[in-house]
Image (cartoon, rainbow, N blue to C red):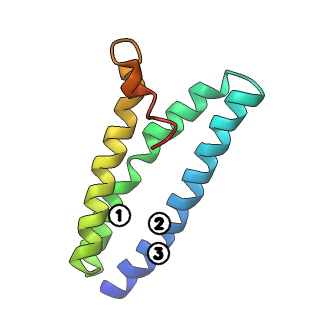
Amino acid sequence: MRRVARYIYLAVAWVAIAGILVNIYLAGMAVFVDRSYWDTHSEFGYSAVLIVPIFVLLALLAWIPRRLTAWLAALLLYYIFHGILPSLQENLGWIAALHPVS
């Protein structure tokens, strides 16, 4: 079971990297081509956050070292923070401006 979980963990890691690159590309398309890509970028980003809890679960099943599992839990908190930033645009625009940087 542990060995299978490690292979799945590795596959999910590559899917996550590909997802991050696709989302960056969608943001670039929204800036340089057509603003309608913002909706796609936003929805893709919100759905991509679902992969992080899967990462944590697979890390526990695969007996990935605890330190790395803790970093994955921190990554989940980061994704939540990163997803909240754009919603702060009206009241706390100076904080929402951190979204492209983070």
Q: CA distance from mark 3 to mark 1?
A: 9 Å
Residue where numbered disc 1 is placed: 55
Q: Which mark is residue 12?
A: 2
Tag 3–tag 1 contact (CB < 8 Å) = no
N-term-proximal mark, 1 vs 2: 2
Image location of residue 53, percent across then percent down? 30, 56
Give the labeled residue for mark 3: 10
Residue 71 seen by the camera:
yes
The three-letter code of the residue at mark 3 reads: Leu
Q: Quadrant of residue 51?
A: bottom left
Q: Tag 1's secondary structure?
A: helix
SS for dot 2: helix
Please name the amino acid that badge 2 sits on. Answer: Val
Against 23, is 6 above or below? below
All told, the count of numbered labels is 3
Q: Can the viewer see residue 1?
A: no
Which quarter of the figure has residue 67?
bottom left
**Mark 1–mark 2 contact, CB under 8 Å?**
yes
* Residue 88 in picture, x, y percent from top left: 36, 21
What SS does tag 3 mark? helix
Q: Amino acid at mark 1?
A: Phe
Q: Which residue is the extreme one toward the bottom?
A: 3
User: In the picture, which quadrant includes the N terminus?
Assistant: bottom left
